[in-house]
Amino acid sequence: MALSGLFLILFLLEHLYTNVTLFFGDGGVEFDETSHSMVRMIIIRIIEIVLFLAILIHVAQAVLLTRENNEARPIKYTLNDGGKTSSWNSRNMGFTGSVIFFFIVVHLYNFFLPYRITGTVGGVGQETISVNVVHALENPVYALLYLISVIFLAFHLRHALASAFHTLGLSNKKYMPILDKVSLGFSILIGVGFGSFPILFYGAKLLHKDLLNWAL
Ligand code: HEM
């Protein structure tokens, strides 16, 4: 779980970096060009297959692990005040993970499907991928779903990264406080970073501003 999770974390950093180009105010040109050039690179296509496999492996391992844990202790503890000994994030990884999985399915339906599978976005004479993103995030239902999912993602990552360091044997008394701060910083970066897209694009729509073209 730690290795597939760390791979997904690297993907998130790359994804955030690409998405930030949506704020360049150039009508989405940089974002569209980056997306098109990445699609043409064979290495990216291979990484994409690894990415989808990593998502499936991560989810399957989570389900198996939960089942093993439940079978190991069929009778629950009579006294188990989890709030005193563990964080909300660590006790709800299955729940936050399920919300993220649901989000990924909707997200692939929104962008990956029309752009990469049905070919209804991003081609000659078609809506560009950046305009497709803006249209989706101007919809209040999607904007809210994206925002809520990103908050859950940040909670999930808060525990996930620290836990992955621990699993890989990288944590000890000396480094644990530093690694814990790294996890906190990373989850805030991802939460604020990805959360900024639904907030700013939906906010711009409410204020009748054209965020995608602000510099033109
Ligand atoms: C909230 C802002 C986000 C925006 C605007 C956004 C936008 C996009 C777009 C336009 C694509 C299609 C690009 C392509 O196929 O080349 C895409 C793909 C994808 N996104 Fe996002 N995304 C966001 C957040 C996220 C988050 C938080 C996750 C993970 C939890 C995620 C996971 C994925 C995956 C797995 C793919 C398909 C793989 C790929 O095409 O590289 N996205 N996203």
Image (cartoon, helix red, strand yellow):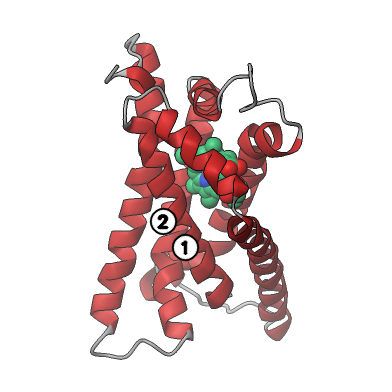
- Do we see residue 72 in this rendering? yes
Tell me the kind of residue under disc 1.
Answer: Ile
Residue plotted at (24% across, 77% down): 178
Neighbours of disc 1 within 10 Å: few (<14), some (14-19), many (20+): some
Residue 80 lies left or right of residue 26; in this view the side is right
Residue 66 vertical placement versus 212 (above, below) = below
Whether the residue carrying mark 2 lies under 8 Å from ligand 1 is answered with no
Q: Residue 206: name its quadrant.
A: top left
- Do we see residue 86 in this rendering? no
Residue 9 vertical placement versus 116 (above, below) = below
Callout 2: SS:
helix
Residue 96 lies left or right of residue 87; in this view the side is right
Residue 114 lies left or right of residue 167; in this view the side is right
What's the distance in space between the residues labelled 1 and 2, CA to CA? 7 Å
Residue plotted at (35% across, 87% down): 171
Q: Provide residue 43's location: percent of width, then percent of height.
A: 60, 61
Mark number, residue 13: 2
Q: Label 1 belongs to which residue?
A: 9
Q: Do the residues labelled 1 and 2 touch (CB within 8 Å)?
A: yes
- In the image shown, does 3 or 126 lie closer to the viewer? 126
Tell me the kind of residue under disc 2.
Answer: Leu
Residue plotted at (33% across, 60% down): 186
Most distant residue in the top direction = 208
Q: Provide residue 209's location: percent of width, then percent of height.
A: 32, 12
Q: In which quarter of the image is the C terminus?
A: top left
Residue plotted at (55% across, 29% down): 129
Q: Provide residue 121's location: percent of width, then percent of height.
A: 65, 26
Neighbours of disc 2 within 10 Å: few (<14), some (14-19), many (20+): some
Mark number, residue 47: none
Q: In which quadrant of this rendering is ligand 1 seen?
A: top right
